[in-house]
Each structure stands twice: as structure tokens, then as C-alpha cells.
Amino acid sequence: MFCYTNFATAYAVCPIPFRTVTNHYRVLCSCNGVLCMSNSPIDTYFMCSSYDPPINDNLICITVYLWNPTVRKFKILPPYTPLGNKKLMSNTFGVGPDHRDHDFLVIKIIYFYDEYAGTYNGRRRPLTMVYSLNNKSWSSVAESVVVPCFAYDYPTAFVNGAIHWKAFSFALNEPVIMYFNTAERVFGEIRFPDNSFDPHMNRVHSRVAVFNGLLAFIVISTLHPAYREVCDIWVMNEYGVVESWTQRFAIPIPVAWFERPLGITKNNQLLVDLDGKLFWYDLDSHHCGILGYHGVQCSFDVETLTESLYLLKPSRQ
């Protein structure tokens, strides 16, 4: 763990307090100081385009853990309801607080494989399950609640009482941001600005993020004909109003074989994975650098943690 004001040295090393039968750990998402992790072996599903994951009902039974490093507590979530002979296409997770009921939720969206289409095409209704930390159990959302998009298994952003994913809308036939309001327990979608994806872009990598408490979208691309790497940061100044999207930054970054936006820290530092090394750029001072520690491509990740008491109390937080 590193303090966001000083990336030079680690101020804490937190051994993972649980073990998995696969000896594999994957960070699914995080929010308010709680990491949602699993023993899933398919973390490269959306990271590496060359990876062809098996379609297997047993993937639905991955073990999910909640871990709060601040209070050194973790919780193993109970298994989900079996789905019979339906074939799983992918799992998408999200976590976030329900401030109305003083609860903390884990959202799991299960997309099913369409044998006729050979993939997921939006025709088969996804299954959405919600784990309540207060109730200590999973439940399905109401039948009337519709999942409008295919949410990618990318990092999430919690803004305005909702969990946000980068997604694809089959109805609009375009990429969008899908959200789940944790208090109302309903889904919705937010469109991107029309010019957020330049037609001359190549090798686009993107993710949702939070910038100064506002919903943000980070896009890294190679621009022709200069073939230079550029990171654009778009910010939605008025939540839910598409016209309020503003391109706040256009940052040149070092050219790399592999680049992946990781997020923005509380003191406005952009973090990017460049070939397994952590590149940072200060949005205020315009200083930048590459840290000495590094990871393995497609498995190294960064999460922003805020100290909280979730998992410390046995009931309501």
C-alpha cells in the first residue's frame, strides 16, 4: 500500500489473509476501502484479446471475498443459486454503499451464452444478484428491473450513489456507461460525448473513473499520423446531463507496447500501466514519472483505498 501523497515508498505491506484453492487472486473492484476479490482464473478475459476463455457452468461458482485492509477483516461470501444448464458468458461485479439503508452491496451481473448467435447478443436476459452485508445473503433484483447493456468486466466508479461500468448498448449500438443505483436498485445508462472517440484513433484503451467527485472517462489512444500516445480525460460536470461532458485534459504519455488507464488519485494524479510499470502524471503541476516497482502485464492493478470501518461491525455499518 502506498500513500497517495508519496509514491516513492510503501507505507504498509498487507499480506492477503485468505488462501484460495487455485492459488490465484483477482481484484474485481473496490469502493470505500473494501476490496472485492475472487479466486477466478479468468482475469485476462477482457484484458488480453488473444485469450479465449472456456464457457463453463462451474465458473459461476467462483469464491468471492470482501477484504478491508484498514481493519484487517475479510468475509467469504456465500455461493450463488445454481443456474441449471444455462451456459455462462461472463460475470461482472460492482460494490458500493447503500446510504439510504446504511448497507454495503455487492452486485453480480451474469450474462448468458447464446448458442444460436455463438456469443452474448443481448437477447437472453441477464441475471442480477445483490449481496447485502446487513442481511448476509444474496437476492435477485425485481423482475421489472432491466439490465440495459453488456457491462465490461472493467474497474468501476462509484459516483452519485451509483456503481458505473463501461458498457455496450445493443439498443443504441454504441459504447455507453451503465450504472446501478444502490438505493433504488435500478439500472440506467449514460451516453458518451459524440467526439470522445476520434475516428482516427488506434489501440483505444479506456475506463470510467472519478475526478474531484465527478464522473470521468479516461481514453488512451495512438493518434495518426503522429503515432503518439495521448490520454484524454473527460469529466461530466452535471451528473446525467450528456451535454455537460467536458474534455479537461489531453496528456501525452510515453509510447509503450501495452498501456492501460488505472484511475485518478484524490490529489489529482493520473495513473497508467505502461508495460507493467506504473506511470503517474500530476494533473496540477504537470510533473510525471515512472515508479520503480512493477508488475506482470494483465495481472498488475491499482486500487484507491479510503479508510473505513466496513466489515468491522457485525451488522449495520
Image (cartoon, grey):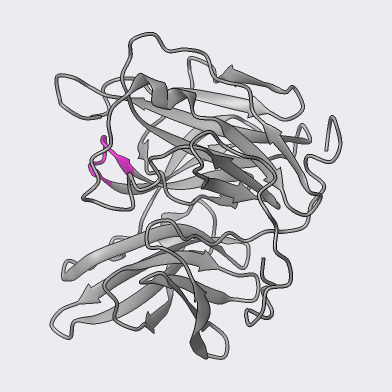
Compared to 59, does 306 lie above or below?
below
Residue at coordinates 23% horizontally, 75% vertically from top-left? 222
Q: Nearer the viewer, residue 170 or 59?
A: 59
Compared to 281, does 211 lie above or below?
above
Q: Is residue 112 left or right of residue 284?
A: left
Q: Nearer the viewer, residue 48 or 182?
A: 48
Compared to 126, does 75 lie above or below?
below
41 in the magenta segment: no
- State the image coordinates of residue 162 (x, y, percent, origin top left): 58, 43
* Quarter placement of the N terminus: bottom right
- State the image coordinates of residue 100 (x, y, percent, origin top left): 75, 35
- State the image coordinates of residue 13 (x, y, percent, origin top left): 70, 63
Residue bounds of the magenta highlight: 168-174
Q: Nearer the viewer, residue 115 or 184?
A: 115
- State the image coordinates of residue 280 (x, y, percent, origin top left): 50, 79
Residue at coordinates 81% horizontally, 50% vertically from top-left? 71
* Quarter placement of the C terminus: top right
Q: Is residue 49 left or right of residue 40?
A: left
170 in the magenta segment: yes
Q: Is residue 197 visible?
A: no
